[in-house]
Amino acid sequence: MSALIVSCDTISSFLKTPLKMPRANHHAKLVTLVLVLMPMFIGFAIPSHPTMTKLADKGLSYLVFIILALIGIELSQVEGLGSQIGEIALYVTILSILTIGSGLFALMLFDRLRPWHAKKPSVKSKEHRVSIRGSLAQVVCVVIGMVIGYFLPDNYMPPENTMTVMLMILILLVGIGLKGSGITLKEVLLNKRGVEMSVIFTLAVLIGGLIFALMFSEVSWTKGLALASGFGWYSLSAIVMTDAYGAVWGSVALFNDLVREFFALIFIPVFMRKYPSAAVGLGGATSLDFTLPIIQQSGGLKVVPLAISFGFIINIVSPVLMVVFSALG
């Protein structure tokens, strides 16, 4: 389980669509989707081995910081970024309210209409300490990348396809980590409530993305859906959105999903008693890894299988939706 906890946050960190291909080219979109998802299938296909899983976890941990630094470097190259800070903050604020609020409201309603009665836990889990410092470290990495990018000569800038390579490595390691975690697709899909939560959460958050698009004329409905599809997976959404819409929108996606992580760490214990499904859903994709410890601490071991089922599905759905919606325009 610990292997999965590390890998998925990192997972939650990198799926992206960095191939800079013409958007009108449908073949290019298909290739992009394949390049994003194929490494995960390869990771699942590789026979599981404890040593390989540990190496994948470690690699993911370092890869997250490298990718966030690269995003910072890209941001540093945006002309007039300072004048857009206020606009970015506005986008992030509204998008966060809509995506977090819509998912939270839908799952609270679900808890009201279909109260959850937990069965005895069948999953063992260790105690893990959770610190908000981990989230702050991600922001620091982006800032460091921006500083590096500001002073780095043009000749030393990372090659154009660097992000594509990083993304593929990330997804491969994620697949290995998921396979090595011992969680099977059968176990995930047999948790009926976890599946129901995933569907409700996904639809509700996407509605939030559509509302966001309706509020801003410069945001198409596909862009609104793509931005909403990060589901808390900040490293992944930042990469995909940066590639699809530029560094400014990549930063909007990054901070939107980081806000979800901060919000989840603070409010999961608040909602857990009366609204366990909503509490688990607050973490989005991170409920499988980064926010899982606090879910366990506030809800007990009985809620862990639910969080794992929900988080696993969201981690699979998120990259697919982001790539598809961003490819559409």
Image (cartoon, helix red, strand yellow):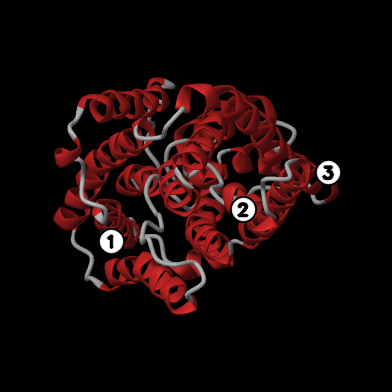
Front residue of 20 and 290: 20
Name the N-terminal-most of marks 3 and 2.
3
Quadrant in which residue 270 is drawn: top right
Residue type, numbered disc 2: Lys
The x and y percentages for residue 52 are 17, 57
x, y percentage for residue 312?
Answer: 48, 56
Label 3 to label 1, Cα distance in Å? Answer: 39 Å
- The secondary element bearing badge 3 is classed as helix
Residue at x 54%, y 55% (from the top left corner): 314
**Spot occupied by residue 181 in the image (x, y as percentages of width and height):** 33, 55
Which numbered mark, 3 or 1, is in the foreground of this view? 1
Say which residue label 2 marks.
Answer: 223
Residue 204 or residue 81, whichever sits in front: 81
Q: Mark 3 or mark 1, which has the lower sequence index?
A: 3
Q: Which mark is residue 112?
A: 3
Nearer the camera: disc 3 or disc 2: 2
Gap in angstroms between the C-alphas marked 2 and 1: 26 Å
68 sits left or right of 80 in the view: left
**How many numbered callouts?**
3
Q: Name the residue at 37% across, 29% down.
A: 138
124 to 320, vertically: above or below: above
Residue linked to disc 1: 172
Element at badge 1? helix
CB atoms at circles 3 and 2 under 8 Å apart?
no
- Spatial CA distance of label 3 from label 2 is 32 Å
Task: Judge whether residue 268 can be spotted in this image.
Answer: no
> What SS does tag 2 mark?
helix
Foreground tag (2 vs 1): 2
